[in-house]
Image (cartoon, helix red, strand yellow):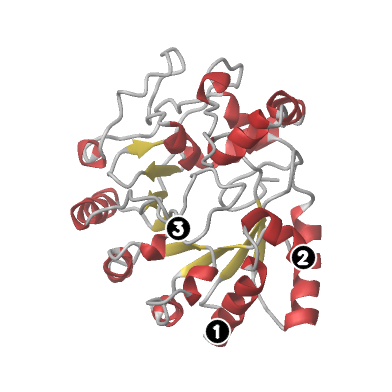
Amino acid sequence: MIKTMKDTFELLIDTDFPPIKRAQLETLQVNLGYLCNQQCLHCHVDASPRRKEIMTARTVSDVLEFLKHKDIKTLDLTGGAPEMNPEFFSLVRRARDMGVHVIDRCNLTVLLEPGHEDTASFLAEHAVEIVASMPCYLEENVDAQRGKGVYQQSIEGLRLLNSYGYGIDEHLSLNLVYNPQGINLPPSQSELERDYKKELKQRFDISFNNLFTITNMPIKRFGSTLVSKGLFDEYMQLLKSSYSKDNLSGVMCRTTLSVDWQGYAYDCDFNQMLGLPAGLSVNQDADTSSKKHINDLLQTDLKGDDIAIMDHCYGCTAGNGSSCGGALI
């Protein structure tokens, strides 16, 4: 039986989150599509093997033009599993030829999929930074979030990346991502990183650079689970009661622009999943029909623009803060 996902958009509209504005654009985060070889419980994208949305070669060219015109130094590729888009490899090559630093948000298991036997070597050849999903160093917890057998496949993927120098060679960065289980905030990033490094080294002789702790967002699949279990209000109260104004200056939306698989712009990946367009004034209603394509923003200076906010923004400012680069403080 197919379960209907419960949308949390309407539950997040009314907010007292403080207004924030854009700083200088440094990173373009691009979603290459929602196709994925996994279907994780905590996924805010609702990615799965059944999704058909995928970025075309035409939109990839638009992305490259935007990078060049705006002189952006970092391209952050996400999905789904970004490597499952056939245009992934061309985009990486062309971006690296432009001198752009490329990040691949990899789920590790995709490296073992048929047809991806050469993906790890390709990433190493082009010195792509890898940010890999590894929500725990314990098999039981990983498989509970990501599916049975995913832990062992992830270990195999990490060993493969180590064999190409990732996490060992100073030019090949391998960073792991932790997501908490249930309605909890991440623990101390530095302490958890020490535990990860100890466990993965002792048990599997695996090396990596950094651990990023990321708070689960009350949207899409995780948000739907909260609503279904009657835990949405409790989780939102946790996020709000743990708010720290010290995190506000470091939230990723200030320096990152998120682009969906069709080329439309959003202030962050979470707003993209909510369909909340970039530049929506704090005085405007949450109108999802006013989205802009990156081609329409080539001549626009985004610095100083309002960032579209709703209640889910508390997820990035709770506790030690959360971003695609981990804790903020």
The tag on residue 19 is: none
Gap in Å between the C-alphas at discs 3 and 2? 23 Å
Please report whichever mark, 1 or 2, sits nearer to the chain's N-terminal start. 2
Residue at 67% from the left image edge and 78% from the top image edge: 207
Q: Kindly report which numbered mark, 3 or 1, lies closer to the viewer in this rendering.
A: 3
Q: Report helix, strand or loop for mark 1.
A: loop
> Which residue is denoted by mark 2 in the rendering?
138
On the rendered structure, is 268 left or right of 236? left
Quarter of the image for the C terminus: give it: top right
- Name the residue type under label 1: Gly
Please report whichever mark, 3 or 1, sits nearer to the chain's N-terminal start. 3
x, y percent for residue 251: 57, 39
- Taking the image as drawn, is residue 178 in sight? yes
Q: Report helix, strand or loop for mark 2.
A: loop
x, y percent for residue 69: 23, 50
- Taking the image as drawn, is residue 218 in sight? no
On the rendered structure, is 295 left or right of 30? left
- Name the residue type under label 3: Cys
Classify residue 303 by image quadrant. Answer: top left
x, y percent for residue 124: 45, 79
Residue at 54% from the left image edge and 24% from the top image edge: 310
On the rendered structure, is 181 left or right of 209? right
- Name the residue type under label 2: Leu
Gap in Å between the C-alphas at discs 3 and 1? 26 Å
> Which residue is denoted by mark 1 in the rendering?
165
x, y percent for residue 45: 49, 44
Query: Is the residue under label 1 in contact with that under label 3 (CB below 8 Å)?
Result: no
Residue at 60% from the left image edge and 73% from the top image edge: 153
